[in-house]
Image: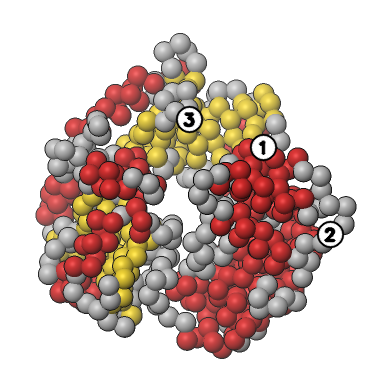
Amino acid sequence: MQFIEFSNLCRRLESTRSRLDKVAWTAEFLSSLTPEEVPWAVAFLTARPFPAADPRILEIGWPAISAAVETPPSSIPTLSLLDVGAGFAKVAEVSGKGSRLGKARALSELFGGATDEEREALAKIIHGEMRIGLHDGLIQEAIAKAYGAKLQLVRRAGLFLSDLSEVARIAAAEGAARLEAVSVRLFIPLLPMLSELSTDFHEIFRAHRGRSALEYKYDGARIQIHKDGGNVRIWSRRLSEVTRSLPDIVELGRGFDGESFILDGEVVAIGRNGKPLAFQELMRRFRRIHDVAQAVEEIPLSLHLFDCLFLNGASLIDEAYEQRWLKLEQITAGRHLARRLITDNQAVAEAFLKESLEAGHEGLMAKDLDSRYEPGSRGKRWFKIKPAVTIDCVIVAADHGSGRRRGWLSNYHLAVLDGAGHFAPVGKTFKGLTDEEFKGMTARLRALQLADDGYTVTVEAEVVVEVAFNEIQRSPQYSSGFALRFARIIRIRDDKAPAQATTLEELRSLFERQFLTKSRFDL
């Protein structure tokens, strides 16, 4: 299949908001491909240069991309889908001394063989955003339609494989019926089970039939540990492999009983006083691939396990949480487990929450003792309990939406008041508003518009919103020097004027207060 056909499909998808058309056109395209081409097509449609399970990354910067764009384009389309996949592979495989220049040359070679139309698609894949309104749910529908598979089987296989490219390949190469046999596999990370947010223990006990398992909600990073014999590998919440960065956790995994297993847990960075470090410091460990031994020494980690998904060749995800915990206790001999309490008493639960917060953690998880492990699923089987700290921010700009939010201004640039009466940016968010609120906010910001560069609309600082967040981080990206982690709008504060927004001094004070319960990294 010629890559120009893929580019044409992308332009068609971008031209319509019809969900049915998007699925039909994508299914028609997939059904015309060979099984070898299918994984690449699905990866590109999801704005990835490689299938999700492929660990290769391009590792290219703006200079390489700019140099590639400046190369003269091809006058005729000659690239195939497989040529583009091979081109990305060539970029990713350049390593060692002079790799930056080598990657730039390989990327320029790929762009040099592409027409102007094809370059647009290549750039979107590299930037990780196709802007064609084709989310994973629609791709699953297209796969089912293309190969005559039951949508439920496609979704189920996607949860187990965490890679729609592989799901599509199986359906194309082995037949739709083969999807029924897909199950949990070692060294293929599962999407993590998710939780709903709640601060009401009465609601939680009612949902869990009067009794719940409470676990500390650690302010760390979710990991999934896979072991087969002496081979141990680790993945992050986002299904990126982090084995090289966590040799200390690999060693812990090797020490647990069981010939093979998949464990779900959290790692927390620990300061010299034994208290948790801020999440920002933990990320230094996750991103470190050089001088790892030094990082292990500087930023030690504690491991807190809370689930066992696979043991000695058998999947456990259909077993009850209580049974999975018992097996987790057995293989770890009770070591490195999340602190846990089973109770039906609200006063006891409140005291346990207070204990967790005073220890520097985020709050609690509440889990139904009978719950199955459902990868990627969110519901009342698991609740997350953490008191929210909020501040009042002013919206100073907004980005044009894409996909389902196309036509709206939906990614809001948040700012606080600095000491000179100006507004200092502290982050962005598109979370917290309903569709109707998005529409209303779009109209409101359009009336306040100062400039529009085609991507971001700058507006008069008039709209105040109450914002919750997980943590305040140091950030050189913003002139305020701070960034809100996981910011989300709680409500629109029409009762407040911009001059009543949170000040930078107040934000700095909140930042410092975090260290009453957390450790400060001061190496």
Answer with the quarter of the image where residue 304 lies: bottom left
- Could you say whether the residue bearing mark 1 is in a helix, strand or loop? loop
- Which residue occupies the foreground of this view, 97 or 339? 97
| Image quarter in which the N terminus is found | bottom right
**Residue with the mark numbered 1:** 455
Tell me what residue is drawn at x 61 percent, y 64 percent: 43
Residue 52 percent coordinates (x, y)? 52, 63
Residue 337 percent coordinates (x, y)? 18, 61
Residue 36 percent coordinates (x, y)? 65, 76
| Image quarter in which the C terminus is found | top left
Asked if labels 2 and 3 touch by Cβ distance under 8 angstroms, the answer is: no
**Residue with the mark numbered 2:** 77
In the picture as drawn, the residue positioned furthest to the front comes out as 97
Tell me what residue is drawn at x 50 percent, y 49 percent: 96
> CA separation, marks 1 and 3?
19 Å
Residue 42 percent coordinates (x, y)? 63, 67
Answer with the quarter of the image where residue 283 lies: top left
Tell me what residue is drawn at x 59 percent, y 35 percent: 398
Q: Give whichever of discs 3 and 2 has the lower sequence position.
A: 2
- Could you say whether the residue bearing mark 2 is in a helix, strand or loop? loop
- Which residue occupies the foreground of this view, 343 or 515? 515
Give the amino acid type for the residue marked by disc 3 in the picture.
Gln
- As displayed, is residue 216 above or below residue 425? below
Q: Give whichever of discs 1 and 3 has the lower sequence position.
A: 1
**Residue with the mark numbered 3:** 477
- Could you say whether the residue bearing mark 3 is in a helix, strand or loop? loop
